[in-house]
Amino acid sequence: MQLGWTEIGYSNIVFVFTLAYGVSSFLVGKLIDRLGTRLGFSLAVFFWSISAMAHAAASSVVQFAVARSCLGIGESGNFPASIKAIAEWFPKKERAFATGLFNSGTNVGAIAGPALVTWLTSRYGWRMAFIATGALGFAWMAAWLALYSRPEKSRLVSPQELAHIQSDSAEPAVAAIPWATIVRCRQAWAVGLAKFFADPFWWVYLFWIPDFLNRNLNLDLKGMRLPLFVIYSGATVGSIAGGWLSSWLLKRGWSVNASRKTTLLVCALAVTPIMLAARTHDPWVAIGLVALAAGAHQGWSGNIYTIASDMFPRAAVAYVVGFGTLMGTVGGMCIAKMVGYILQRTGSYVPVFILAGTAYLIALAFVQLLAPRLERAEIQG
């Protein structure tokens, strides 16, 4: 790309995007809780679409970074709104699987997106690629507004289906919740620290795996197509499998606490082999290890989002997810700078993958310490 940047310069762009995404997640999560899922998510996607198209006007690294920051603000509404929608439409025993399904869509986009963007760029230029992808957001927003409503207001839901959706114990009415109340809850910090330690390595998979494939395996852009397809397909499978396992254990009579944490432990252990990925000389072994770690991360992520809805009332779910996302992006900002300097000075991914292989077990230890039984947070409206 004609803008040009060094390893550290690129890490700065990632840092700025992550900062905007993280800070906005906390604020946008609260906004979505106040406005409701339907309107709040629509506004977030509208801003995201405008910001995506604004990249086409960038003519310098600074302007590109500003556009990325705005994109991060719009994108920050995605997970708070999505998890809130899951809490509105599914009982607890089905939420993890539902979360895994929608979370897998990010990986489908990661597979289809490069092919679409590559074609648009080669045919019309990189600026038009940003305009076209931003325009897709407006199409999605129109479909969302036409189709989404709360189940009790939907004409497509039968009385029997509504009873199933609302089969959990009735929640007491909770008024607007101050942010200070949320951050004083140890359950919120369980979610936050789980995201802080684990989320940075999803940013690594998104932003640095192409460089890893080139640096360690000598693959060019054309040669990366199949490996990236394998990696993001693995992430898609992991997202669905992690949600399925948690929900399956619940249906087998396991407690919410045991089913969620067993699944988190399985995911954390599945990440550890990535520590060998930068040491092997077999490209497909390396690709397989990264795909396994990416899938385990997505299974982990879906269950962390789900425990937020397990421990908090629906009125606070988007805010708690926003807080968790903020913590995750703080970790992401740290890892962005760390990876930039590690690669600039050593040229090796070994330290990066060692950190990735241990981070999830540390995160799980904090979840167990702060929420040993995944008990409900006591919040007074």
Image: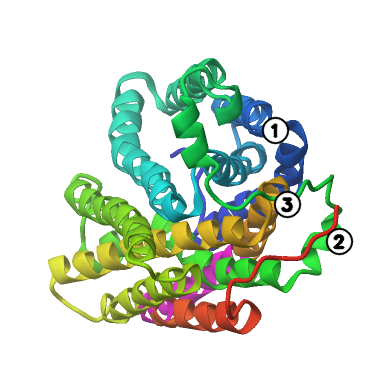
At which x and y percent is residue 324? Answer: 64, 60
The tag on residue 36 is 1
SS at badge 1: loop
Residue drawn at (76%, 69%) of the image: 185
As helix, strand or loop, the secondary structure at mark 3 comes to helix
Disc nearest the viewer among 3 and 2: 2
Q: Residue at x 41, y 43 (%)?
A: 102
Range of the magenta residues?
332-353
Residue 163 position, x and y percent, is 51, 37
Dominant secondary structure, magenta: helix
Crowding around mark 2 (Cα neighbors within 10 Å: few <14, some 14 to 19, many 20+) is few
Please say if 87 is above or below 47.
Answer: below
CB-based contact (under 8 Å), mark 3 and mark 2 = no
Residue 355 sits in quarter? bottom left
| In magenta segment, residue 352 | yes
The mark nearer the N terminus, 3 or 2, is 3
Amino acid type assigned to the residue bearing label 2 in the image: Ala
Query: Left of 309 or right of it: where is 239?
Result: left
- Residue that numbered label 3 is attached to: 26
Q: Nearer the viewer, residue 86 or 132?
A: 86
Question: Considering depth in this image, is 62 or 96 the residue closer to the camera?
Answer: 96
Magenta span includes 16: no
Task: Give the image location of residue 17, x and y in percent.
Answer: 61, 49
